[in-house]
Every structure is written in C-alpha cells, then in structure tokens.
Amino acid sequence: MRRKTGSKPYASTSVAVAVTQHRDITGLFAKYGVQKWNFATDKTDGIAMVRFEMSPDRWARVMLKMPVEKPDGNPRRGRKPAVNAKEKAEMMVWRALYNWLKVQFEAIEYGVFTPQEAFLGWMEIPTPEGGMTVAEALLPHMDDLPRLLGSGRE
C-alpha cells in the first residue's frame, strides 16, 4: 500500500495525540519552572494522569477521565475521518487540562493565588495505601466537614 509523500501513518493514533498534548504541557511546566513531572495512562479504566512537583516533597496529581469509544457518526463520502471521535475527545480533554494549568500558573505568577491555593485539591497526601489527593480524601466527607471542623453549623 502506498501512502502520500509527507503523510504520517501514525498521525491519527492515540499515541500521537498523547505525545502532542504531553509536549505542550511539558513546555508549560518548563515556562513556569516546574522541574519534575510525569504522565501515566490506564487504558483499562480510561484514566490519564499528570503529576508534577510543586515544591520539594510536595506533588500535585491531576487525574483525567478519558472518553469512551463512540461511533463517529457521519464520515464524508465513506472515507474514514482523519481523527476519529474518541481521539478528538481525548485531544479536547488534554487541551482542557493544558488550558486549566496555564490559567493556574498565570494566576500564581500574578499573585492572585498561592500555589497551595491553586492546586489544593490536587495536592498529594501520604496514606497507608500509598497516597491520595486532598480532594479524594475530603470529597466523601463533605457533609461531615462542618461538624468535624467544629464550625457549629450542622
């Protein structure tokens, strides 16, 4: 099978989507001085993760729910679309993360938030099971927080 000169056989794969989005996020980390980060994907559970060091021994972990496979609907003239619906949705999720991170870093840079305020829900805390984010620890107990914190509002 021949392919057009200059075309990339991998251009519409999930790997290419991830590489492009990781490159953009990595550039953002470099711009704002983040020295350590990593990406991970669990295809079975449909989760992607980016983790980065906010300060020595303080990491933030953002988990992304990836879209499930959906039919593309209406390919024109019977041709397969250049990017299928799932890959397009994955690009949108990664782009949303990039934009969210950019806004957080800019708000920190302008003094609107501290890094702890901007990323509080995503900060990792150690647990016997290996760690969880502040949000993972608190969200199941939101209804009990006023009582637990002694606010008197129950």
Image: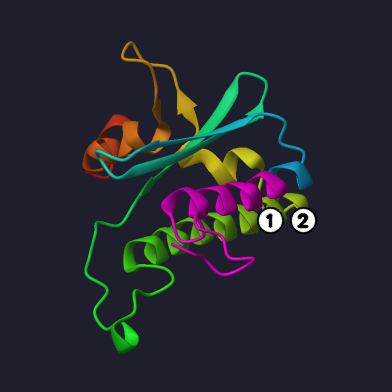
Query: Mark 1 falls on what kind of element?
Result: helix
Asked if 20 appears above or below 88 in the picture, the reply is: above
Asked if 46 appears above or below 56 in the picture, the reply is: below
Location of mark 2 (residue)? 110
Write down the quadrant of residue 58 in the picture. top right
Asked if 139 appears above or below 101 in the picture, the reply is: above
Is residue 91 visible from the viewing direction of this image? yes
Query: Mark 2 falls on what kind of element?
Result: loop
Q: Quick one: 126 or 144, which is closer to the camera?
A: 126
Image mark count: 2
Percent x, y of residue 50: 50, 39
Percent x, y of residue 140: 23, 37
Location of mark 1 (residue)? 107
Residue type, label 2: Tyr
Boundaries of the magenta span: 1-28
Q: Quick one: 93 or 105, which is closer to the camera?
A: 93
- Is the residue marked by circle 1 packed among few (<14), some (14-19), or many (20+) residues within 10 Å? some
Identify the residue at horizontal 34%, vertical 74% (top origin). 80
Percent x, y of residue 133: 41, 32
Q: Is residue 10 left or right of residue 32?
A: left
Q: Is residue 20 left or right of residue 145?
A: right
Cβ atoms at labels 1 and 2 below 8 Å apart = yes
Identify the residue at horizontal 56%, vertical 48% (top origin). 19
Write down the quadrant of residue 87 in the picture. bottom left
